[in-house]
Image: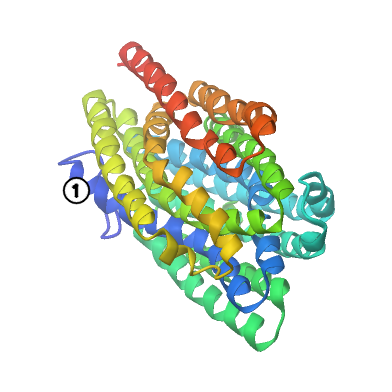
Amino acid sequence: MALTHRQHNIDMLHGSLFDKILLFALPLAASMILQQLFNSADVAVVGRFDSPQAMAAVGSNGAAINLMVNLFVGLSIGANVIVAQYIGRRETAKIHDAIHTSITIALLGGVLLVVWGLTMARTILTMMNTPADILDLAVVYFRIYFLGTPFIMLYNFGSAILRSKGDSRRPLISLASGGVINVILNLIFVIGFKLSVVGVALATVISNVISSLMIMRWLAHEEEPFTFRVKDLMLGNSYVLQIVRIGLPAGVQGSLFSISNVCIQTAINGVGSFASAGSAAALNFDFLVYYIAAAFTQSAVTFTSQNFGAGDYTRCKKVFSVSMCVGVVFTGLACIACAVWKTELLSIYTVNPEVLHYAEVRMIHVVCFLWLTNIYEITSGCLRGMGHSTLPTVIILLGCCVLRIIWVYTIFAAYQDFAVLMNVYPVSWLITSIATLIAYYIIRRKTF
């Protein structure tokens, strides 16, 4: 059956790129930001209506949660790439099988995450030097959050499938719906029922369930060969291998990123509860700005994958240039906004002066330099779209993970200053960007 382009889809193989990348990336950025707002809303509600300890308990979970979740979410990039390449080649039968293999991987990964989260919560958080006054609360949030991970996996893999065919709008709609419900339930559970950390965790799980079910319903009603059917779930060996080959390096990268962030969070926890809470508040804006860069990265992955599959290498080069320029501009504007209105923005999460101090330090030393992440992220995204996933992963791990761990145990250990600890981010971004660009141009010259 011939592939059809419905109103939700963007034709990535023909026409101008600037407007299409914008139309694809902006809803995707909004989707990622809304997904982060699930956790941000939790931090904001407990920070304003409960206690600094509850706020720190929720915020300090981020690095540990991402440690495992990112491994499986990274696999969804593999699903995106192979489905998009099959679309470029018009191999409809393989599209069907790749989609159902991807959803099976999502379900199995979600179950594994539930087991891991329930059994390892206290061990992981204790290893992170979580302050004693927030440890029990942090464990409760961690365990409840992981009960919802099968739905997080379904959402991410289902969204990757929709994006592979040029649809970034419906993932936004589903997350917007879940996000509104999350905020409402946060307020009801925390203010109305006084459930504190338990309440915000339950609200997050429920919102993830709603978002994922919306995605799966849309997939069930897609035109062939994109239609999802439960009876067609499978684990095709060739598709699993392709998804793992492309997605596993990205997942390992995300998880090892989290290991370096766990080391940094451990150092932050050692400064005290106020530093932990302040970092958690500013980290929300760290994520929000970063997700703008991540949206243009995902655009680069998907546009490159389809055009690489179609053999249009000249268009692949244009995808890189347009994505990089637009990504840097949009992320830079967000960085400027965070610098100008840092106090007003941070007051959304806390009014405690000591917490605000640490939050503003992170905002100045980290968030204001996040535009640098476009350089290595978009470059590695284009490489993955071309089927080269391992090399950019190795470069990013050395530059953004190993370097950060060394920094924590050497430079920060010598100065014991919160600002010095935060400086590791822009330094690692700059070094990684230079190395990734060199690798990209070498591989592109050989491949094209």
Q: Quadrant of residue 223?
A: bottom left
Which residue is at a point 48% across and 75% down the rendered structure image?
Answer: 180
Which residue is at a point 37% across and 32% down the rendered structure image?
Answer: 375
Which percent across, then down, holds residue 341?
Answer: 37, 61
Q: Is residue 365 above or below residue 195?
A: above
From the viewer's perspective, tell me whether residue 247 is left or right of residue 270.
left
From the viewer's perspective, tell me whether residue 37 is left or right of residue 61.
left
Q: Is residue 105 above or below residue 372?
A: below
Which percent across, then down, holds residue 211?
Answer: 52, 66
Q: Is residue 44 above or below residue 432?
A: below
- Kind of residue at badge 1: Asp
Q: Is residue 307 above or below residue 155?
A: above
Which percent across, then down, holds residue 26?
Answer: 31, 54
Which percent across, then down, holds residue 409?
Answer: 70, 29
Q: Would you say residue 90 is visible in this rendering?
A: no
Which residue is at a point 34% across and 11% down the rendered structure image?
Answer: 446
Q: Which residue is mark 1?
A: 19
Which residue is at a point 72% across and 79% down the rendered structure image?
Answer: 195
What is the secondary structure assignment of the residue under circle 1? Answer: helix
